[in-house]
Amino acid sequence: MSVTIDLGQAIHALADALDLVGVDKVLHGKRVAAMAWQCGRALGMSEPETEDLFHAGLLHDSGVSSTHIHHCLIDQLDWEGAEFHCFKGGELLGQFAPLSHLAPIVRYHHTHWEMLHALDVAEPVVRSANLIYLVDRVDALITPHYERDLLLARHAVRDTVWRLSSSFFAPELVALFLDLSDSEAFWLSLEARHLSRLIYERERAYRLTPISFPELRQLALIFAQVVDAKSPYTMEHSLGTARLARFLAERIGLPVEVCEKIEVAGLLHDLGKLQVPDEILEKPGPLSREERSLIERHSFETYQILRGIAGLEDIALWAAYHHERPDGGGYPFRCSGTELTLEMRIIAVSDVFQALAQRRPYRRSLPPAQILEMLRAFVAQNRLDEEIVELIGQNLDTSWRLATSQETEPGTARH
């Protein structure tokens, strides 16, 4: 099976997901992309080169899943361990052929110039990586001042960049940035209402790019790995849900194409959970009403991210409806009965099974027989689909293996 999607839309969807990690400090990746793009044009780069620079800016923090790490990256100019997310981000992008050429830029985007230019790295990568680093640190420094005293604060930021010339940043890039950022317009264009115009215009400039279904699955795996890396208690959740959902779809007899799309929806279903603060996912006790309300946003955020990719409309719905219930008591759309398709019901059951099979901060992993008993109780309450739960009962051991990968130290997202 092949699909045709706009690769630019997929990149923007991933960037939207990464934005969620900031919780209330969003748009970091988009501002970095916008500044890098402007600098690239001022350097005289070609259109393909500036497009790559823009994409690298959008995705430079693809190795960041934790809200704690994101706060460090925004609140501190430099800190020990900052390069770990660069390794991870480069590794993730390297797994997806259409974006693998951006992996070295992401890999080195926190390497100081005094070290970077001495490494055996191609010059274009060195320049692009250091430029991303420069504007990334600019955004970290100026973030507290957006929508407040931006124009006043810019002078201190420019002074800091100048002082870090030849140590953190290449002197010629510093000179270019200082020249470009001398105008008020450079800074005002980074405010949310103006930035959205640039992002919209750039997104419209992309071309439709056909990719094979294995490539789509690989892209979904990147999304899933970003989500599952958020906490020790989210490891393998998306992967386990996707494996189980595909197995159940196959056992029911759905067409191969549908089974493959259900697997992708399973990989993507928890994208919105990137917005949930780490301390909530790892809380060892009951959640407060406020904390529960934050959790209940995540499937809506998943829908908002995926609905922007033309060609994935059904996958977006299947993924986003995984907390809806036949009795209408689910969230966030409050759908019920026949509004919930078989594909949605499969992912919902798979999500619950995997969550119960994995360790949580407040309980151990539950054994298969106990999980089946709980699923049947949910059926009696009209919260899950009976046919799918009974199918799990007929294939309990296999379902367990697929959901858990037989890990010795399993973890899960808070369901």
Image (cartoon, rainbow, N blue to C red):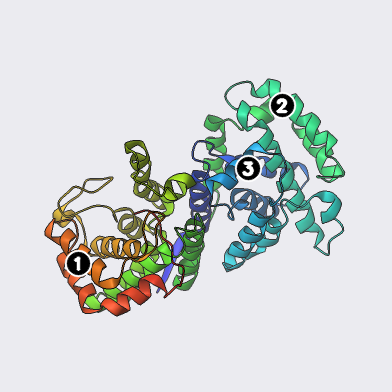
Q: Indicate the position of residue 294 as horizontal and vertical percent values.
A: 38, 41
At x 39% / y 50%, what residue is drawn? 302
Q: Amino acid at mark 3?
A: Cys
Foreground of the two, 277 or 323: 277
Mark 1 or 3, closer to the camera:
1
- Secondary element at tag 1: helix
Q: Which mark is residue 154?
A: 2
Farthest residue in the left direction?
380
Read off the residue under disc 3.
72
Left or right: 10 with respect to 38? left
Looking at the image, is 18 positioned above or below residue 88? above
Q: Which residue is painted at 41% across and 63% down in the image? A: 237
In the picture of the structure, the residue carrying the numbered disc 1 is 373
How dense is the environment of label 2, judged by Cα within 10 Å: few (below 14), some, or many (20 and up)?
Answer: some
Q: Is residue 308 visible?
A: no
Which badge, 1 or 3, comes first in the chain's sequence? Answer: 3
Percent across and percent down for residue 281 are: 43, 49
Q: Say which residue appears at 44% left-offset and 66% top-offset.
A: 410
Q: Is residue 151 above or below residue 100?
A: above
Name the residue nearer the viewer: 175 or 61.
Answer: 61
Mark 2 or 3: in front is 3
Quadrant containing the C terminus in the rendered view: bottom left
Is 10 left or right of 36, judged from the image as shown?
Answer: left
Left or right, 131 with respect to 250, comes to right
* Type of amino acid under label 2: Arg
Which mark identifies residue 168? none
Q: Is residue 123 visible?
A: yes
Q: Earlier in the sequence, mark 2 or mark 1?
A: 2
- Please tell me whether mark 3 sits on a helix, a strand or a loop: helix
Q: Nearer the viewer, residue 301 or 296?
A: 296
